[in-house]
Amino acid sequence: MILIESKAASVQIRPRARLARARAQAARAALADCRLCAHDCGVNRLAGEQGLCHAGAEARVFAAQAEVGDELELLPTFAIALSGCDLRCSFCITGAESWNPRAGEPLSAAAIAAKAAAAVNDGARTVMILGGEPTVHLPAALEIVAALPETARLVWKTNAHGAAQARELLDGLFDVWLADYKFGNDDCAERLAVVPQYQRVVRENLLWANDHSELIVRHLLMPGHVACCWEPIARWLAAALPDAKVSLRSGFWPAWKAANHPELCRPLSATESARAWSIARGYGLQLIP
Amino acid sequence: MKSKADQTKMATTRSAPATELRIQADGTILTHNLTPAMAEMLSAVNPADRLMKQRARASQRQTTHELPART
């Protein structure tokens, strides 16, 4: 007997890949008047102009490897780190790569996706796209998604400073948004990361992400900033996103230009850490390891 | 001695899986970009660290512990 495989059965239907490919084209076109992040620069990156992130039209990658340092439910993850960021956090642990979009090596979406797919086959639970800040390289990030297997569980690791245009292009493509909420007030955000209107923008992104995907809110505890940053964040999360998963990170180390700010010249103290966890428990946050 | 250009390149590109460690004065070890192999090693160093044990256990999902992963 001869079995003939039907043509329909042999055609791979890859709806996420198709959507990501179309979105990647739209995102690339958007670089001509770049408003992907909330800085809203409006520069033509396709013509070589640079906004506040200094990123060009082509993405570069400075790390791509299997990792187990993120939230346990995401592990192991294959983490793809794109160079460049729209924030200027003094304490950035990858400052050399995040402040410099020309760091690392040119990105081949197909090659990096092949490595990620191999990692998934080897047992990686998720593929995480991060930076720097991946929003500033949305076309490349979406091209990676388009080249990944449909079954790969995708994590968008972001500083939550994207604009509505970026969110629309990301809608429906990532399973989890792992979003940083770094500062609990606009003064600290201005002083430590040179970013205006931080609260409004981050909250807008978190509320959107919670409605459109699974959301994990991450906060890196900073020495000297438990009362001014973590407490107001915890209070807002309890009121606005009571069911969101919250990841409280206590491993601050004084990296990059942290020495420009006296309070950031040391790690978190045990007292501060205990106080932060007490605040989290007091507000009933859904803490995850 | 490496030239300044070499040092810059080392600071901004990586050709092999890498974890950064910071050892505090009190002996606490902080990590960044924790790889599966490093998690297993740190878990062996301090078996009482339950969270690191969970990370090491998660890393055992990877049949290949260190991927030729950097671009």
Image: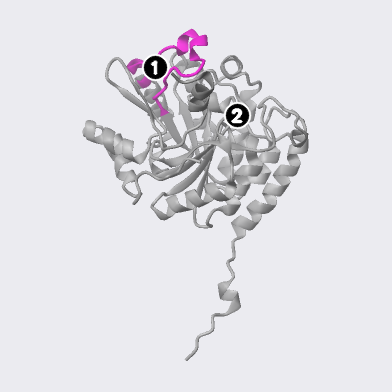
A220, B39: nearer the viewer: B39
Color style of the picture? one colour
Q: Secondary structure at mark 2?
A: loop
**What amino acid is labelled 1 in the image?**
Pro
Q: Secondary structure at mark 1?
A: loop
Q: Which residue is mark 2?
A: A85
Residue A166 horizontal side relative to residue B27, left or right: right
Q: Is residue B23 above or below residue A122?
A: above
Q: Which residue is mark 1?
A: A267
Q: Report the magenta residues as a range.
A: A249-273
Residue at 54% of width from left, 22% of height from top?
A: B5
Residue A156 at x, y percent in the picture: 54, 41
For the C terminus of chain A, the image quarter is top left
Residue A111 at x, y percent in the picture: 54, 49
What number is the disc on residue A99?
none
Q: In which chain is the residue bearing label 1? A: A
**What amino acid is labelled 2 in the image?**
Cys
